[in-house]
Amino acid sequence: MSAVRSSIFACSPLATRGQTVHLDADPKGENILYTNGKSVYIRNLEKPHIAKEYTQHSCNATVAKYAPSGYYIASGDERGNVRIWDTVGEEQVLKLESRAIGGRVNDIAWDGESKRIVAVGDGKEKFGHAFLADTGSSCGEIMGHSKVVNTVAIRQTRPFRAVTGGDDNTLVFSHGVPFVFNKTISDHTRFVQEVKFSTNGDMFASVGSDGKIFLYDAKTGDKIKELSAAEHGHTGGIFALSWSADSSRILTSSADQTAKIWDVEASSVVNTFNLADAGSNFLGQQVGNIWKGDNLVSLSLSGDLNYLDPSTSKASRVIQGHQKAITAFSISEDKKTFLSGSYDGRVMSWEENTGKATPLNEASHGNQVMQIANNGAQFVSAGMDDTVRISNAKNLNEVSVVSIGGLPKSVSSSDNQAVVVATENEVQIIEDGKKVASLAVGYSATSVAINPQGITVAIGAQDAKVYVMGLDGVKLTALHTLSNNKGAITSLSFHPEGKLLAVGDSAGKIYVYDTTTGETVISHWVFHTARVNSIQWSPTGNYAVSGSLDTNVFVWSREKTMKKIKIANAHSQSVAGVGFIDETTIATAGADACVKTWKLTHH
């Protein structure tokens, strides 16, 4: 029995207000490169549902850059480490790991020969380090800054030059190699956010929080002109810039929620793209960009990748996704749509065949999404904003909101559209978008499930017991207490036939009970090593899949109970949700903010 990953529906780049996100693309212009959490993502620009991930950083990755050769990527993290790894093949073999600086790596640059690297950021003794990609030995000194360095660029042709810019409002121009300090440039009046050399190597440009764009001679570092003095410029700080392939134009992205294309020779604005977010006055801030071939992409603070079309001055497409950890997940009855909810309350729908994500603003919560359930006709989500939101499965923006007067721990729904919600000390029943009954319980409820037929309700508790109740209309009657689990109950799932109940706990153990008799049916699904976050049965009920805080996914067989498929490290940090698309395909979601699908082989 085995599993092979068939797709990654990748997360969006993680953006922080007031900080540039240094995006990159491979030399051929086929893939975009960015980081989120501990992972680095390589994503096809034309087909964004095609993605790869690199997960070997031990702490949050902050920036990643392709070598000009295209064979290696250098990625930095918040502890000052730079890892250089192979992009050819699936193994992603590590070439070198170097402790470049004492703190967060903000930017990385390669030289044109793919031999030398400069990494800059928030160091304790120094703010930048120049070293050889093969050995890690020094190839110069990055000096002259008194505060955090935000950006670095290296001229791609000889004679090599390096430019760094930082929070001390200055640029430092260095000659190389080895890189040595040449002069300090103090034209900016606020933080320097990004600097880049033109493609032909004749000039370099810098942008900053003062909204200014300066052009300099690449060999001497002498200022040529201020581009931002032109009419119709940015009205806010500028976070990012990219050069066109012929070095005649520059793309800039700004906190004023616009991106602009500038004609370098004429010193004028050619295009202005208004990318404001309708629901927020700051999520449309543009914090990163790339220009590769025909692809002009600007990154919003919300994580949206906006593909810009100069012929219309509008975004031709927008690629969206989660930025924060996914905490809830469900699959539609027709298996064509996934719903996911995240730590920040955002709810997204995903197309199973294309991986396209669409934010559902009406269904989103004001705080963390606790759980999403599905009964065929509806998706039901519970959030830390003390509400349950019920979405029409045929029109996901048709939403009814039910306030439940407490923090929901769990939610479940039956085929007849009865909704059961568990709070700390009561169970509520919702029908037709209204609360119709509630039952106070004498224990701390942690999880709830209602069987598909709508006649049995299971309530998991902190005391490691499951209380099984019969549901007649809106009346709950106690039937059994299931008490084999060893930890607090964290996940419940009824078999499609409605009698068997899979119970996962905080100790990583899963027991399957017969709810009509209270007997234990399966007791050796015990291979998770941490809290079980999600369990789901396959459509036929022959298999079950579980995801855990231990980052692993297991697929279990009900008939051959000792058989299992283990997917190790399915999601970095935690697996939050799992589900079957069919008997041989599963989908999973996790704290890496990604959704993945896997092809199973049963024996």
Image (tube, rainbow, N blue to C red):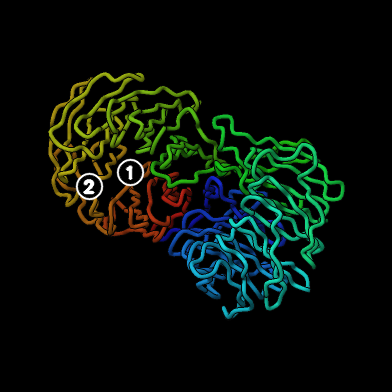
Most distant residue in the right direction = 266
Q: CA distance from mark 2 to mark 1?
A: 12 Å
483 with respect to 139 (left or right): left
Q: Quadrant of the N terminus?
A: bottom left
Q: Quadrant of the C terminus?
A: bottom left
The amino acid type of the residue labelled 1 equals Gly
Q: Is residue 11 visible?
A: yes
**Of the pair 558 and 244, the residue shown nearer to us:** 244
Which disc is residue 512 wearing?
A: 2
The residue drawn where x is 74% and y is 38% is 272
Can you identify the residue that label 1 sits on? 541
**Of the pair 367 and 543, the residue shown nearer to us:** 367
The amino acid type of the residue labelled 2 equals Val
**Of the pair 238 and 331, the residue shown nearer to us:** 238
- Mark 2 crowd level (few <14, some 14–19, many ≥20, 10 Å Cα): many
Q: How many marks?
A: 2
125 with respect to 206 (left or right): left
**Percent coordinates x, y for residue 288 in the rendering:** 63, 49
**Percent coordinates x, y for residue 107 in the rendering:** 59, 61
Report helix, strand or loop for mark 1: loop
189 with respect to 542 (left or right): right
- Mark 1 crowd level (few <14, some 14–19, many ≥20, 10 Å Cα): some
Instruction: Answer whether labels 2 and 1 touch (C-beta < 8 Å).
Output: no
The residue drawn where x is 17% and y is 52% is 486
The relative height of residue 368 versus residue 62 in the rendered view (above or below) is above
Q: Earlier in the sequence, mark 2 or mark 1?
A: 2
The relative height of residue 67 versus residue 266 in the rendered view (above or below) is below
Report helix, strand or loop for mark 2: strand
